[in-house]
Image: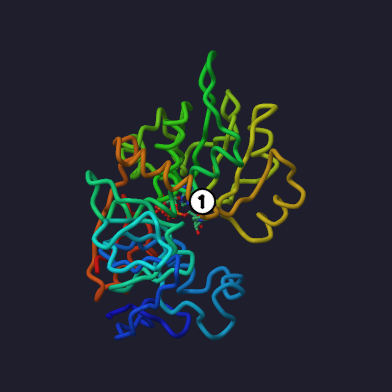
Amino acid sequence: MRAATYARYGTPEVIELRDLPLPTIGEGDVLIRTRAAVVGMGDWRMLIADPFAVRFYQGLFTIKRPVLGWGLSGEVAAVGASVQRFAVGDEVFGESPEAGGFAQFAAVSEAHLALKPERITHGQAAATPVAGLTALQGLRDVGQLASRPSGPPPRVLVIGAGGAVGSAATSIAKILGAHVTGLDGAAKHPFVLAHGADAVLDRATDDFTASHEPWDVILDMVGRAPIAACRRALTPNGRYVAVSGKLRRTAWLSMFGGPRMAGMIAKPNPADLEQLRVWLADGQLAPIVARTYTLERTADALRQVGAGGNLGAIVVEG
Ligand SMILES: NC(=O)c1ccc[n+]([C@@H]2O[C@H](COP(=O)([O-])OP(=O)(O)OC[C@H]3O[C@@H](n4cnc5c(N)ncnc54)[C@H](OP(=O)(O)O)[C@@H]3O)[C@@H](O)[C@H]2O)c1
């Protein structure tokens, strides 16, 4: 099969298209003929090894996972002996814990897959798991966001609302019954509002910590706002959730922040993936794909993600 691979850290020039043997599948695995894989900030960070801590996961000098691509969608080409939920020909999407989406085929445990709703494209399906699981777990589990039976809706601030996780978080916070304010550059405001935000703040001119009303949940995909100011901007039971930020900052939050100030790393979760599938199927979640590239142009797709400013997901089609 054809695969976009890399053998050393660097700029997208290090990406090389190679012929690899088909992945072998274990008893509980599904072999997917990949139709689309999302190119995300995670892929970019793994490519350029920024932050340095990436190397503890992906290899200090030798790359452990030469084929990137965590979020993917495609057709089932073969199933392991104990696979129950899928059959050859099914259209599935999910998050591969060991990456491998930037290739014509990928082997993924059935636990990490769900049926692709017919109404969405493979590109939209591929764009959902990484961003959607992070947003859902960040808001609901770490942020403790829950709809209120009476009274005003909880106030959620999404920092970086125009990005992959931010746009998913905006939609999901609305589904969970919140009043949502999205913070990002002005050029992204129409995009953020299209995902259901009630209000927008401009990262160049607005100070969210000076809001006259405190926030019940702040979900931060940027991680540059001063921690003390974030704490002051919360309601007494409010929570600040750092999805991104310097390792030192998120480690400090995880160790000393207490329940109200926390860093998080999303985890694969079949029930959460199923919840995302339901929202995709009923149209409550509708990710936008900004641009698709062929597998041969994976390096260009990575370059575009690294440049930022994208209004929607960047996807590689196999
Ligand atoms: N903890 C986890 O489990 C987890 C999971 C997934 C991702 N992440 C991390 O979370 C971060 C966000 O991921 P993503 O995929 O959503 O990235 P993304 O698509 O690049 O989104 C980031 C958004 O923030 C905007 N932004 C940049 N600086 C800002 C500022 N000072 N104020 C407000 N908005 C600002 C960006 O605008 P521009 O595009 O114009 O720069 C972009 O819209 C990344 O660092 C990623 O590695 C963590």
At x 32%, y 63%, the residue is: 37
Question: Quadrant location of residue 167?
Answer: top left
Q: Is mark 1 within 8 Å of ligand 1?
A: no
Q: Residue 311, how many percent across, how many down?
A: 31, 50
Rendered image quadrant of residue 61: bottom right
Quick one: 116 or 157, which is closer to the camera? 116
- Secondary structure at badge 1 equals loop
Task: Return the residue nearer the eye: 129 or 211.
Answer: 129
Q: Is residue 309 left or right of residue 243?
A: left
Residue 228 lies left or right of residue 80; in this view the side is: right
Q: Residue visible at 36% across and 63% down?
A: 39
**Is residue 43 left or right of 313 when viewed as pictured?**
right
Residue located at (42% from left, 34% from top) = 200
**What type is the residue that disc 1 sits on?**
Asn
Q: Residues within 10 Å of mark 1 (few under 14, many from 20)?
A: some
Q: Residue furthest right?
A: 256
Q: Which residue is mark 1?
A: 269
Q: Is residue 305 above or below residue 49?
A: above
Q: Of all residues shown, which one is farthest toward the front?
A: 81
Q: Is residue 145 above or below residue 256?
A: above
**Count of numbered circles on the image:** 1
Closer-to-camera residue (110/105): 110
**Against 273, is 90 above or below?**
below
State which quarter of the image contains the N terminus: bottom left
Q: Residue at x 34, y 84 (%)?
A: 21
